[in-house]
């Protein structure tokens, strides 16, 4: 693989960029792989990457029904933070955040991780208490956060209105090392690195069946033929239930539409990410200048990648209360993604009733920030059969009642 | 350079001059102008700078598809960035500023980027700025952000208002060109309720510009008659300046009406967002002309052929004295004709086709215009404006045959139907080889609630380009939408046109240096070479190529660039265009204001505000409010220059020593009534409620089916069949819904009704040693300990007001909660305040309530509980009936983790130094877990300074806590220091309950 | 933006009048059930790509719970019916069979 650098760009510029090679190969599927990952989104690719990098497992195929990074990886609001309350959540998201910090260098691909800081606004006394508690928990979890005053919020976010008539800003939970990254680049960077390790990324390859023998996985049927494997990782977000069905088990998951929107681009006016959970809205400004806004999820099952417009109305209303100037911006584009919600709104990284099949799903509204950590933990789980980060997220936790509930500190979990 | 012609202009009123400013320069136009036409008329061709290379940009289009001419319009609270000059109608005093340049539009330092463009190909930032790591955040990213971003951020609060409308119609017709009018006539005549919306400020679209003749009349006359006919129909509503912005599921559509953007007088709502529910939606949204890709096609003066025609005919504006027309189809010849008729020079029509022929071609030739067939533009000459074009053979690679001096270039690459609304909700497209365009696939339309297709494309939006077929198609669409038989459609004269030649690169074999100057996306600076690079690097999916190059991601969302871009991609991949497919069309069609989306709901109307019956009194008496759900409750009633803390302490001390009043009206009050009410209550609550005697109260716990504690409150049994359930303030609606859900969906055969009476009653807690005295002074009821013991209730009258009095206490004091009809709450409150004077009465707020309950060790939902706390954790096993087989949550609590003896349990925590434990602090244990996190063994759930005890008190959940009384735990502060606290009973004050039982 | 007809009051409800309530026709397992039954009841969901039976409440209308048969891929609504039943009405199942040959939902087909 040719390394990317300013020098490489200059060299290529002289020959009209005709010398660039493919970012990832486009191979034909082999008959057998040690590991097959279904789903070439961020989580699937990161899992494959860590299988190769950390565990030396490189005879790996990543099968993708559409195009890599084409699901929620490329549809989210790109927020990265780890200021979670519960230990298991903080562990995986902080692992993830720390991997994001060096991901551009690790992958030799600029994923534009921008540790610009994330504020979660406290707009009720209840939220003040919740976020103070989170700050306490984070201090013990090795996650650097602090509860800051309204004045400090205003310094960090000059366009904010502190004394909105309904929900004044009473403070905020500030994670200075949270931020954003370029979502597509995360998928592309991992894909390039996986391909470079000799892994096969096979796009436009839909899995149509999963074959098992004696309670153990044997392989998959695909639109490009049958492929056998030693282990199978299912990392397909909103389509997890469908794949689990093929493998013969059910999941504590429901798929719903989650929406987001962007404004037209404007000159920089907000350097940090702001989340306002009381009023259900969050916003950051992309490097292009668009205000990127996350909205609410529908409460009903849906696979259309379209949501209901009243959520957009509610979100925009809430954000105008918090940032009055955005009233005079325009919505450029709105879209929906299908997210998989579990019974406690925390993810599943788990063995399954079928030996050799592993699930990674249930990220709900918060998957992007977890990509590197999820890949790290999932790879460990698949390679070694256990992982201190993944284990608490086992799908058996529902029958045991061992919830990982993040709704305590924040009305909207993510 | 552009100028205003001496005559003509069908949309302008030369009698009405309109003054405006551009970048502070005073200019003038005419009523009826758009900002773009007025600027061109005033000779201002340079209108902006591009996003990436800061290239000079002029207007290329005449409508909503314009990517370049974006302005910041208005001042102060009326300022808005990124407004298209082509859709902004001129009004007196309009102020416009160009964007994305520094220090000025004419001289922009950022323009240096264009010299570096060779080093900034698609995706360059993914390959650069990787080292050193801190530089991305501190150096590279700030620079990139500052140079991107287009318009300035608004600074002021929006000075305008917005509103929402609802409409339920049989047929919504999007687009008021001749197709929309024909469809509306057909649907309207069939009796359907029709809403016809047009985004521009005039009806008829471009038919008059193109010289159509309909039903024997000039298009202009036919349009006027059609609009008149429609206005006379009661069942048809017509709206100008109203754009169908998005189509959503089940026939929902958004229309965006701009009410004052075109007026100097900004009174009244600025925008109106229509939320339309339509039986059928007819998309008569026309088509958009595509540019051609050749070197220098972004230089100001290169415009769409149709736009050139529009400016000449509609606004009498000449884009240039000598306009070269370049095309691959016949339609562009109409522009040559229009220019010649206006007395302007057309040095040549450059036609990529080998042998163009037909009446339009002949007419142009007869006007003395040279037609160069089989030719291409090798490159456009000029920098900030066009000075000429170099001509080459289309079949070649760009060797210059001749150069033609000109100051404008009119370009046409064919027309793309506007399929956005068709596609928003899942309509699929099909590639029309003959027209080289995507059009709606009639077999794969968006389906509605009944499974039937509910969007019907009409006219050019359906790929019908000739006027006659536009009319017949739209007429049929309108009739179909109304469920009627199509009668006779309007007819038009037919002008024969030759076939289009698909041309995606000009010349077809253009060398790299030409391809690197051939723009696809003008605003985002995406060139042919960028898309080809994406393909070479494996970004083969159209979505990958789009995201890698940013093609079509600008504010015009690729209206001009998408088809050319994906044709370029398909060519690079050696695939067919339909194989590559399109990116997803998402609403809105063009950007709509955030203000319109929010509508009226801002400021005081943002969300409903719930006021207790005493709210006015609180406001008048210095209440410091806090939001509790949609309620606002007094946090404390400050006096003089007290701090919040001082005020709360005073309220507590006064209540403990004398008399305090609390507005408890927000507490939920739900009636459960019926023969099976007792049975139902036993399922709802963990307690045995069916044994509660009428006249008595019982504290009850309610769990979710998961077993987690969800709400608590005092239940009073009013009679054999009736229970009154008090809930938390925030929980009333949720609890009521919870009850209804179980009653309706699980135990629907049980004879029980529920009613949420929260707002029907005012409830006042009369608290403190003097509580009985003040009530006795009001008179009317015997409230002695004997008649009304603790946990009893009675009805009667107090101060002449019918009341129900509950003898319950959440403070540990002697306490009565008095419920009266909401309308009489204020009278009772004022009577209590007056009668309480001699007892030193003071109102108290929620914080005093919280502290007093914590002093008594009472739990608070939301503090001691969180999503996963069960009653057993809180020492509340006494409130869980052992006799019942079942209650909601019982099975959930039997699960392994909930039944475990190792759970953290409720205790009191008392700091050794008397300080207040930090909010939310954790008790640490030795060592760290496998993930390097510090082990913990408990946490603080409530922590306060107790004025009563004058030291910190806290409650918390601690592992094996109740068995570890007296042990000292360490709670680190966030600054790393620690506080030591002893495990004690959670009841800090009056453990024997002597004060409340008097 | 869905519309569903409330089978009680007959109103063609806009989605904003309704609150969604998840999968319909769940059998409650209380004390005495085993862990598998309880998990099945409380957590495991059909989540189909296709026809789904689900619960809705006409929350800002008559307040009644009802059931809907709706396709999660196209959002087509096949019918709504009162919540006080343990399985979908036979005529509705017949209608779905006709429109979507080969569909299945739990043990219904």
Image: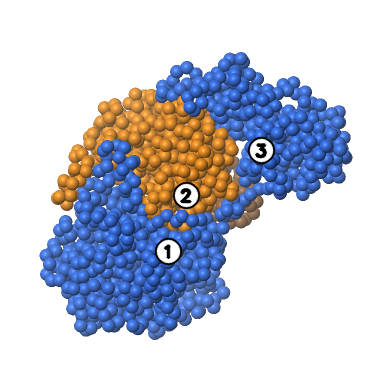
* Residue at image point 42% right, 43% down: A272
Q: CA distance from mark 2 to mark 1?
A: 20 Å
Q: Which residue is mark 2?
A: A159
Q: CA distance from mark 2 to mark 3?
A: 31 Å
Q: Nearer the viewer, mark 1 or mark 3?
A: 3
Q: CA distance from mark 1 to mark 3?
A: 48 Å
Q: Position of residue C63 (x, y in %)?
A: 64, 48
B722 left or right of B364?
right
Q: Which chain is brown?
A: C
- Look at the image and tell me whether residue A255 can be seen: no
Between A152 and A22, the one nearer to me in the picture: A152
SS class, disc 2: loop
* Residue at image point 47% right, 33% down: A146
Q: Position of residue B301 (x, y in %)?
A: 27, 69
Q: Which residue is mark 1?
A: B73
Q: Relative to B314, say whether B277 is above or below.
A: above
Q: Which chain is blue?
A: B
Q: Position of residue B408 (x, y in %)?
A: 25, 72
Q: Relative to C108, say whether B425 is above or below.
A: below
- Look at the image and tell me whether residue A158 can be seen: yes
Between B96 and B356, the one nearer to me in the picture: B96
SS class, disc 1: strand
């Amino acid at each position: 693989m040719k390394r990317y650098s300013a020098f490489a760009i200059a060299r290529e510029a002289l020959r009209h960029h005709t010398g660039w090679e493919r970012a990832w190969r486009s191979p034909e599927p082999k008959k057998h792989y040690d590991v097959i990952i279904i789903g070439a989104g961020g989580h699937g690719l990161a899992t494959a990457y860590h299988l190769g990098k950390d565990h030396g497992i490189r005879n790996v195929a990543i099968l993708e029904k559409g195009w890599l990074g084409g699901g929620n990886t490329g549809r989210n609001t790109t927020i990265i933070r780890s200021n979670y309350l519960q230990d298991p959540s903080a562990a995986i998201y902080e692992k993830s955040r720390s991997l994001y910090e060096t991901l551009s260098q690790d992958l030799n691909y600029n994923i534009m991780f921008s540790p610009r800081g994330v504020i979660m606004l406290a707009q009720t006394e209840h939220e003040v208490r919740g976020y103070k508690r989170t700050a306490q928990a984070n201090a013990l979890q090795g996650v650097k956060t602090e509860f800051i005053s309204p004045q400090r919020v205003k310094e960090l976010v000059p366009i904010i209105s502190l004394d909105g008539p309904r929900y004044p800003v009473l403070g905020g939970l500030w994670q200075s090392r949270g931020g954003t990254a370029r979502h597509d680049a995360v998928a592309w960077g991992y894909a390039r690195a996986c391909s470079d390790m000799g892994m096969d990324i096979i796009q436009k390859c839909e899995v149509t069946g999963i074959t098992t023998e004696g309670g153990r996985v044997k392989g998959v049927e695909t639109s490009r033929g049958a492929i056998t494997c030693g282990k199978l990782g299912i990392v397909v977000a909103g389509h997890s239930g469908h794949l689990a069905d093929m493998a013969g088990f059910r999941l504590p998951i429901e798929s719903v539409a989650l929406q987001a929107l962007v404004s037209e681009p404007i000159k920089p006016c907000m350097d940090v990410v702001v989340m306002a959970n009381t009023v259900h809205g969050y916003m950051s400004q992309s490097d292009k200048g668009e205000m990127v806004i996350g909205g609410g999820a529908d409460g009903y099952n849906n696979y259309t990648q379209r949501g209901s417009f009243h959520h957009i109305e509610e979100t925009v209303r809430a954000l105008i209360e918090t940032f009055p100037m955005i009233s005079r911006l325009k919505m450029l584009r709105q879209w929906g993604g299908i997210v998989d919600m579990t019974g406690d709104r925390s993810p599943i990284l788990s063995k399954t009733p079928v030996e050799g099949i592993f699930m990674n799903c249930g990220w709900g509204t918060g998957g992007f920030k977890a990509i590197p950590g999820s890949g790290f933990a999932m790879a460990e789980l698949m390679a070694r059969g256990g992982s201190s980060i993944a284990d608490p997220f086992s799908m058996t936790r529902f029958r045991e009642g061992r919830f990982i509930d993040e709704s305590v500190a924040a009305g909207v979990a993510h | 350079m552009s100028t205003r012609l001496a005559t003509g202009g069908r949309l302008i009123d030369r009698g009405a001059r309109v003054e405006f400013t551009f970048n502070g320069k005073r200019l003038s136009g005419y009523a009826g102008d758009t900002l773009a036409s007025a600027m061109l008329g005033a000779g201002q061709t340079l209108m902006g700078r591009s996003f990436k290379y800061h290239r000079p940009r002029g207007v290329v289009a005449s409508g909503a598809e314009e990517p370049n001419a974006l302005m910041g319009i208005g001042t102060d609270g009326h300022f808005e960035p990124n407004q298209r000059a082509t859709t902004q109608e001129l009004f007196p005093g309009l102020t416009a500023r160009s964007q994305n340049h520094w220090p000025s539009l004419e001289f922009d330092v950022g323009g240096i980027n264009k010299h570096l463009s060779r080093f900034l190909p698609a995706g360059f930032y993914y390959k650069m700025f990787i080292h050193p790591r801190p530089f991305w955040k501190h150096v590279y990213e700030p620079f990139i952000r500052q140079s991107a971003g287009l318009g300035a951020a608004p600074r002021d609060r929006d000075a305008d208002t917005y509103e929402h409308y609802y409409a339920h119609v049989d047929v919504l017709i999007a687009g008021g060109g001749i197709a929309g009018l024909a469809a509306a006539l057909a649907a309207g005549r069939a009796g359907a309720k029709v809403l016809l919306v047009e985004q521009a400020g005039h009806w008829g679209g471009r038919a008059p510009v193109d010289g159509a003749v309909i039903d024997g009349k000039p298009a202009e006359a036919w349009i006027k008659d059609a609009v008149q006919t429609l206005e006379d129909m009661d069942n048809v509503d017509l709206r100008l300046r109203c754009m169908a912005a998005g189509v959503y599921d089940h026939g929902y559509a958004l229309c965006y009406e701009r009410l004052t953007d075109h007026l100097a007088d900004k009174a009244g709502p600025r925008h109106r967002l229509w939320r339309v529910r339509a039986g059928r939606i007819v998309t008569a949204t026309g088509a958009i002309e595509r540019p051609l890709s050749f070197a220098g096609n972004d230089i100001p003066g290169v415009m769409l052929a149709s736009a050139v025609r529009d400016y000449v005919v509609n606004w009498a504006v000449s884009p240039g004295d000598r306009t070269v027309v370049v095309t691959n189809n016949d339609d562009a010849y109409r522009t040559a004709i229009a220019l010649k008729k206006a007395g302007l020079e057309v040095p040549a029509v450059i036609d990529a086709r080998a042998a163009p022929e037909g009446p339009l071609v002949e007419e142009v030739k007869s006007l003395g215009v040279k037609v160069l067939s089989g030719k291409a533009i090798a490159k456009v000459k000029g920098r900030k404006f066009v000075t000429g074009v170099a001509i080459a053979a289309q079949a070649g690679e760009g060797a210059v045959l001749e150069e033609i001096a000109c100051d404008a270039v009119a370009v046409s690459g064919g027309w793309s139907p506007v399929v956005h609304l068709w596609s928003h909700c899942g309509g699929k497209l099909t590639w029309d080889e003959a027209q080289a365009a995507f059009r709606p696939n009639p077999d794969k339309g968006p389906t509605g609630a009944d499974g039937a297709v509910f969007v019907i494309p009409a006219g050019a939006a359906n790929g019908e380009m000739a006027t006659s077929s536009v009319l017949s198609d739209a007429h049929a669409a309108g009739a179909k939408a109304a469920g009627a038989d199509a009668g006779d459609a309007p007819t038009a004269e037919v002008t024969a046109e030759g076939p289009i030649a698909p041309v995606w690169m000009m010349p077809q074999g253009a060398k790299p240096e030409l391809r690197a100057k051939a723009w696809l996306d003008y605003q985002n600076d995406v060139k042919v070479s960028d898309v080809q690079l994406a393909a070479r690097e494996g970004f083969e999916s159209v979505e990958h190529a789009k995201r890698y190059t940013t093609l079509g991601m600008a504010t015009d969302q690729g209206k001009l660039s998408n088809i050319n871009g994906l044709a370029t991609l398909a060519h690079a991949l050696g695939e067919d265009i339909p194989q590559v497919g399109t990116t997803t069309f998402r609403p809105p069609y063009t950007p709509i204001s955030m203000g319109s989306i929010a509508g009226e709901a801002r400021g005081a109307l943002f969300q409903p505000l719930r006021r207790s019956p005493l709210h006015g009194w609180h406001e008048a008496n210095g209440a410091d409010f806090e939001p509790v759900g949609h309620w606002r409750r007094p946090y404390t009633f400050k006096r003089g220059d007290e701090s919040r803390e001082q005020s709360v302490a005073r309220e507590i001390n006064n209540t403990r020593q004398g008399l305090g009043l609390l507005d408890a009206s927000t507490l939920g009050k739900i009636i459960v009534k019926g023969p099976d009410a007792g049975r139902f209550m036993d399922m709802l609550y963990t307690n045995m409620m069916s044994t509660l005697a009428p006249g008595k109260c019982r504290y009850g716990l309610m769990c979710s089916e998961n077993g987690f504690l969800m709400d608590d409150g005092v239940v009073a049994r009013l009679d054999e069949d009736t229970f009154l359930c008090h809930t938390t303030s925030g929980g009333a609606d949720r609890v009521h819904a919870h009850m209804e859900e179980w009653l309706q969906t699980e135990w629907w055969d049980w004879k029980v009704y529920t009613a949420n009476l929260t707002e029907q009653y005012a409830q006042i807690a009369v608290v403190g040693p003097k509580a009985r005295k003040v009530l006795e002074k009001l008179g009317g009821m015997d409230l002695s300990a004997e008649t009304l013991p603790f946990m009893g209730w009675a009805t009667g009258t107090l101060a002449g007001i019918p009341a129900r009095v509950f003898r319950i206490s959440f403070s540990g004091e002697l306490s009565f909660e008095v419920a009266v009809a909401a309308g009489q709450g204020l009278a009772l409150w004022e009577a209590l305040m007056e009668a309480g004077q001699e007892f030193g009465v003071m109102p108290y707020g929620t914080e005093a309530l919280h502290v007093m309950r914590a002093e008594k060790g009472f739990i608070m939902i939301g503090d001691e509980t969180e999503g996963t706390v069960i009653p057993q954790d809180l020492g509340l096993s006494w409130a869980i009936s052992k006799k019942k087989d079942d209650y909601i949550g019982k099975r959930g609590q039997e699960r392994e983790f909930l039944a475990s003896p190792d759970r953290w349990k409720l205790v009191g925590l008392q700091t050794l130094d008397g300080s207040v434990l930090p909010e939310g602090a954790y008790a640490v244990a030795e060592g760290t877990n496998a993930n390097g996190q510090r082990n913990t063994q408990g946490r603080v759930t409530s922590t306060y300074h107790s004025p009563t005890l004058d030291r910190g008190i806290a409650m918390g959940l601690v592992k094996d806590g109740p068995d570890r009384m007296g042990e000292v735990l360490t709670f680190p502060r966030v600054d790393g220091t620690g506080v030591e606290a002893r495990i004690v009973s959670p009841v800090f004050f009056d453990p024997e309950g002597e004060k409340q039982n008097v | 933006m869905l519309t569903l007809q409330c089978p009680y009051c007959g109103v063609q409800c806009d989605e904003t009048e309704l609150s969604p309530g998840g999968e319909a026709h769940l059998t409650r397992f209380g004390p005495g059930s085993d862990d598998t039954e309880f998990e099945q009841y409380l957590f495991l969901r059909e989540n189909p790509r296709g026809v789904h039976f689900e619960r809705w409440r006409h929350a800002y209308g008559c307040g009644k719970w009802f059931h809907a048969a709706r396709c999660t891929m196209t959002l087509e609504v096949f019918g709504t019916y009162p919540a006080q039943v343990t399985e979908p009405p036979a005529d509705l199942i017949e209608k779905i069979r006709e429109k979507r040959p080969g569909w299945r939902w739990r043990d219904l087909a």
